[in-house]
Image (cartoon, rainbow, N blue to C red):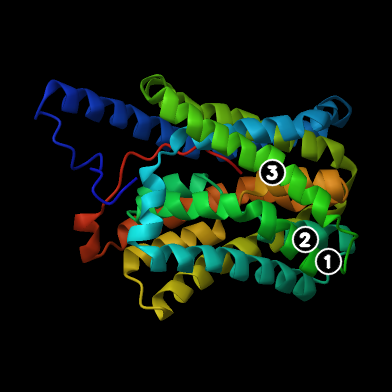
Amino acid sequence: MTESSPSPSSTPTGSSPAGASAAADRAKEDRSARIAVTVFPLLVLAAAAAGFLLPDTTKQLVPYVNLLLGIIMFGMGLTLTIPDFALVVRRPLPVLIGVVAQYVIMPLLGLGVTVLLQLPPELAAGVILVGCAPGGTSSNVISYLSKADTALSVTMTSISTLLAPILTPLLTLWLAGQYMPVNGGEMALSIVKIVLVPVVLGLVVRLLLSKLVDRILPVLPWLSTIAIAMVVLAVVGNSADKVLEAGAIVLLAVILHNVLGYLLGYGFARVLKQPVRAARTVSIEVGMQNSGLAAGLAAQYFSPAAALPGAVFSIWHNLSGAVLAMIYRRFGTDEDATTPARGATPSADA
């Protein structure tokens, strides 16, 4: 996802048979990602409804949540290449701005929302944990659809994910520890197992079997979509008795957290004199969290009720992201004509 990588719209499809084939593969990849990111909220909403209506059946999936999250992160690793990380060297400032914003704005917003709404301890811990999670990979598709900087988005997501074993437990311990006990060491180890190891394995497999992986890339968003829907199924089923009691306040907390993340992320980047496309990217990266990971960690380390904000965020931020993409595309800038991007097929996630 280097700056020199051609975008789907700028690839010279007729220059050679190889170029035409690559362009066709990229078009399939983009089409699959677009459909997945559109259908994803509907599937997750259906999963949430099934979890609520059939709690005794669906909560049996709870022991498999970490495995499902590992599958999602392995899919993310398969979409990465070594050049994706070269952007850290070539354009360190926007990457640094995005990652700092990710781990400063969203955790503090999570705390602010819990104080503003006077959330009970379990829900407060869950909202804060969502804020302390790394960026979600569906943000990469939304960045592409928004005419933002897709390469920058992927790099920001990758770096925030690699930092998650350290920063997510530390921030959660600091901000959520006042609401519920937090075992930061065990949480860090869990994140290493279900995030870092699968991502690195996926990256290694991509390096060793690149041609095979290129052929299956269009399928990855669907596999991840199914996996995160099953996570939501398990989380909601395990906390079905709390949904009616806390559903409305959780939804309000999630909407405030997400929308303010978009706004503050964009404003933060613009104050630091980043171009519009980079600011769009930061806003999307900040507002869209790996809430599936947050839901899984909350269910494991806090309580079923604490996992509700992550499950609701999984549905909401994909809906709001699609709306944000339409807004950004409608209000284009002169920079859009020179958008550097590669075909974006990040694994859809929470």
Name the amino acid, label 3.
Answer: Val
At horizontal 64% and vertical 46% (from top left) the residue drawn is 314
Could you tell me which quadrant the C terminus lies in? top right
Q: Secondary structure at mark 1?
A: loop
At horizontal 44% and vertical 39% (from top left) the residue drawn is 80
Q: Which residue matches tag 3?
A: 192
Left or right relative to 55: residue 71: left
Disc number for residue 119: 1
Residue 38 location in percent, x, y? 48, 39
Left or right relative to 132: residue 223: left
Q: From where the camera sits, is residue 39 visible?
A: no
Query: What is the spatial separation of the Cα atoms under label 3 and label 2, in whole angstroms?
Result: 32 Å
Above or below: residue 304 compared with residue 98:
above
Q: Earlier in the sequence, mark 3 or mark 2?
A: 3
The front one of 248 and 75 is 75
Q: Nearer the viewer, mark 3 or mark 2?
A: 3
Number of numbered tags placed on the structure image = 3
At horizontal 11% and vertical 25% (from top left) the residue drawn is 16
Name the amino acid, label 2.
Answer: Ile
Q: From where the camera sits, is residue 253 visible?
A: yes
Occupied quadrant, residue 174: bottom right
At horizontal 87% and vertical 51% (from top left) the residue drawn is 302
Q: Which residue matches tag 2?
A: 249
